[in-house]
Each structure stands twice: as structure tokens, then as C-alpha cells.
Image (spheres, rainbow, N blue to C red):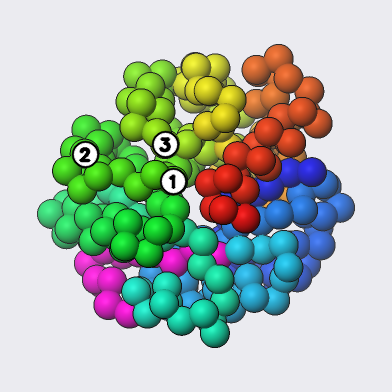
Amino acid sequence: MWFDNHCHLTSLNVEPAEAVAAAAERGVDRLLTVGCTVEDSQRAIAVAADFANVWATAGVHPHDAKLGIDGLEALLEDPSLGDVVAVGECGLDHYYDHSPRDVQAEMFAAQIELAHRHELALVIHSRDAWDDTFAVLDREGIPDRTVFHCFTGGADEARAAVERGAYLSFSGIITFPSGQDLRDAATICPLDRILVETDSPYLAPIPYRGQPNQPANVAIVGAFVAELLGRTAEEFAAVTTANARALYRL
């Protein structure tokens, strides 16, 4: 049974219940729905509360860093809203630069501090910003439980992340013809540090590339990576699920 370590149930083109049911039919029995703004995080927490096998994060994406993180900590402190298992996704995105880079770095550091203070996992988004991402983490101190979601680096970046104790989560991009760097990274990632995700509704794997993605497709991503690593799908599903449970303390 697979664990979709990163999806956005609040952004799908179907109702969350439909997506969760479709995932279960494909052997995906655990999901993490991820917040990208304070308001989206509130919605993610509310969605997760409706399902025994769905958990939520609360964070502000670098695209939205310019909005600030006011109200985010309150979501981590109010158990009546439901359990939050991680801070994020947060980090740096120097590909789009939808928020000024200095503001991205400031909000990233603030959310690292929240993860430390609340003893939560940290979910990182890093695109075209590896040196700066590692610099912020080294300055602030990387939380004990940290994952680079939708990992888009190569073997060198993978080593740097793993050396810092982080997990790497691979999305449908690894199935693309252009994904050789990711395949190289996966092959050097320790088995106890590897995860799979959909990032749905984005990044549908081949053969569904270009279509809206859904959590059920993590089974495709997982089977692809399993074959790459010379593992059976069943074995790799068990390993990645155990890794996700350890990362989020489930």
C-alpha cells in the first residue's frame, strides 16, 4: 500500500472524497495534503480532519512569501482544528521569483524556526535555488525531520541533502525523458531516506503527463522508482510508507 507523501487535495478538480476513494482503489491508502498559504493550510487541515488516513501540513509557499506568515503558528497550536504533522511547504523558488528573494529567505527561515519550536517535520520546496536553500538551512539549523518535496536536483544535490539528514521525495518528473538527473539522484539516495509523491494536481507521470494529476498516480511513480532501484513494487511501497510514517511520526 502506497503513501502519497505530498498532494494538494484543496486544489484538485474533483472533491477530496472522490480523490481519496480513487486512490484507495489503486492501493494508495495514506495521503498528506499540503498547505501553501495560511488560508490554504486551514482548508488542508479541515479536509484532513474528514479522513482517518489523510494528514495535513501548514505552510507558506515561496511564491506566496510576500503575503507573510501571520496566522500560521496559530494553526500549529490549535488542536481543535486537527493534527498538523509538518510545517510547509516552504523554501525558495528562484525559477519564478513570484516573491522577492530576500522575502522568500526571511519567510523560509521563520518557518524553519516554527518547525524547530513545535518539533514538527519540515517540507521544503527548492527550485533553482540549491546553494541558497542549503545556506538558509545551515544558518538556521535543519530540523531533524526534513523532506525535500518534488526533488529536482541531481546526484550532487541529493548527497548534500542526505548529508544534512533530509529525506528526498520524488514526483512524476522522474518518469519524464528529461528526468535523468532525478533518476541518478534516486539511485544514490539511501533506502531509508526516499519517498514518493504526486504533487497533484500537478506533474502527472507518464503516461498521463499533461493531464490533471491525482493521488492514485503515486502508485505509478512508486512502481517506476522501484524498478529503477531493482526492487519490487510491493517492497518499495512498504519501505516508502515506513519512511513517511517515521518522517511525520504517524
Residue contact between numbered discs 2 and 3, judged by CB atoms under 8 Å? no
Residue located beneath label 3 in the image: 166
Residue located beneath label 1 in the image: 145
| Relative horizontal placement of residue 221, taking residue 87 as reference (left or right) | right
Residue located beneath label 2 in the image: 138
x and y percentages locating residue 196 in the rendered image: 60, 39
User: Which quadrant of the figure has residue 48?
Assistant: bottom right
Above or below, 80 relative to 49: below
Between 32 and 93, the one lying in front of the other is 32
Above or below, 209 relative to 122: above
| Relative horizontal placement of residue 30, taking residue 104 as reference (left or right) | right
* Mark earlier in primary sequence (1, 2): 2
Q: Residue 69 colored magenta?
A: yes
Judged from the image, the secondary structure of the residue bearing numbered disc 1 is: loop
x and y percentages locating residue 160 in the rendered image: 33, 25
Judged from the image, the secondary structure of the residue bearing numbered disc 2 is: helix
At label 1, the amino acid type is Arg
At label 2, the amino acid type is Asp
Q: Which residues are magenta?
A: 56-71
Q: Residue 117 colored magenta?
A: no
Residue contact between numbered discs 1 and 2, judged by CB atoms under 8 Å? no
Q: Residue at x 73, y 44 (%)?
A: 2
Residue situated furthest bottom in the rendering: 80
x and y percentages locating residue 36 in the rendered image: 42, 64
Q: Residue at x 43, y 58 (%)?
A: 120
How many other residues sit within 10 Å of disc 1, few (<14), some (14-19) or many (≥20)?
many
Above or below, 65 relative to 245: below
Residue at mark 1 to residue at mark 2: CA–CA distance: 14 Å
Residue at mark 2 to residue at mark 3: CA–CA distance: 12 Å
